[in-house]
Image (cartoon, rainbow, N blue to C red):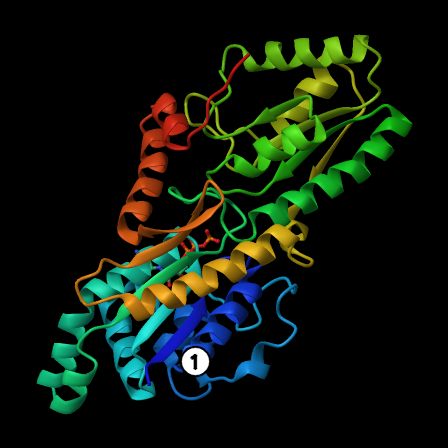
Amino acid sequence: QKAIAVMTSGGDAPGMNANVRSIVRTIINKNCRAYVVMEGYEGLVRGGKDYIKECNWEFVRGWLSEGGTNIGTARCMEFRERKGRLTACKNLIDAGIDALIVCGGDGSLTGADLFRSEWPSLIKELKDTAIISTEKYDRYKHLNICGTVGSIDNDMSTTDATIGAYSALDRICTAIDYIEATAYSHSRAFVVEVMGRNCGWLALMAGIATSADYIFIPEKPAQTNSWEDQMSEIVTRHRANGKRTTIVIVAEGAIDNNLNPITCDDVHKVLSGRLNLDTRITILGHVQRGGTAVAYDRVIATLQGVEAVNAIIESTPETPSPLIAINENKITRKPLMESVALTKSVADAIAAKDFEKAMSLRDVEFKE
Ligand code: ATP
């Protein structure tokens, strides 16, 4: 009987629980033993029965809709060092784990792939220093890893949607609907900051879904010499058409073409100073991560969980670590390392001010 463990890592996202539930139950359904690693990589480094726990079918009961992650998540500095990963390797062998499924963002999946590629040298060191026996060395020589993408940012290349992104988008739209009512009453302007790190997906989609007047996203930076005029012209036109509300959405990673951040204060200055609008700033913050997972996240988390376990069971020591994606409505497997590298290349393109490349890597096309 294979022992397969699942963990969540990085920022929490609605749908992670649904993913863990699906993974645990599929493992059991395939006659393997299911384990959860508590507190992300922190739990791998600490090890022992409190952190690497065998679980049964009932353990994940009721998790399908719940937000956050019930098995915990953490940012773990030790796992970034080889020493920490060596300890994690020993802890996994002590717990008798054959394979690991990691649900997290690009950082977590980079760590997962690194761990897998290093595994042969880590386990050899444990054998050479007599920390583990030759029998254990032979038994656990390979560690298969699979990634599922849990992140509200929808910033991973090669998948159309990350688990949690549509729930966060829903929270943002609801919050902006609430803001609209009060904005209308007082004829006010609101500058709303949304999450997304250096990805503008949440801001872009929320802009479309709430009919915002103007948005700022990292992939299409504000032009230093013209954004103030352009935004003022658009807002003034909308007001002249009889609109009583103004909504401007700022992605937390928004920048100008010199890579300087565009902040809510920058936008506030123009709306209130130049256009004389009664303007308020709302930073939505962690409320965007809260609440239950929307149906779409429950569905992809469940289907991808099944696929992740199948991928693990079918993988050989030679198979590159897979990442479970969704492309054009189909659950697919992608090479994890390529997906992570492609994701990083978007950030690199932005840092190099090659914004067209960044947009094409994100598959975004702007039409007037
Ligand atoms: P989110 O997209 O929600 O921020 P993330 O997975 O990208 O999630 P990170 O904080 O980047 O979040 O990574 C989570 C954890 O993964 C880190 O605390 C660290 O333990 C591990 N990790 C990240 N990058 C690496 C790396 N290059 N090598 C080893 N471990 C890493």
Q: Position of residue 58 (x, y in %)?
A: 59, 83
The answer to which of 201 and 300 lies nearer the viewer is 300
Q: Position of residue 290 (x, y in %)?
A: 66, 56
Residue at image point 31% right, 82% down:
91
Residue at image point 41% right, 22% down:
258
Image quadrant occupied by the C terminus: top right
Task: Say few, some or many: other residues with alpha carbon within 10 Å of mark 1 (under 14 / 14 to 19 / 20 or more).
Answer: many
Q: Position of residue 333 (x, y in %)?
A: 35, 53
Q: Is residue 287 left or right of residue 364?
A: right
Q: Is residue 212 visible?
A: yes
201 above or below 42? above
**Mark count:** 1
196 above or below 260? below
The answer to which of 349 and 228 lies nearer the viewer is 349
Q: Which residue is mark 1?
A: 35
Hey, what amino acid is under mark 1?
A: Tyr
Image quadrant occupied by the N terminus: bottom left
Residue at image point 37% right, 66% down:
310
Which quadrant contains ligand 1? bottom left
Q: Position of residue 210 (x, y in %)?
A: 71, 31
Q: Is residue 227 left or right of residue 148?
A: right
Q: Is residue 14 visible?
A: no
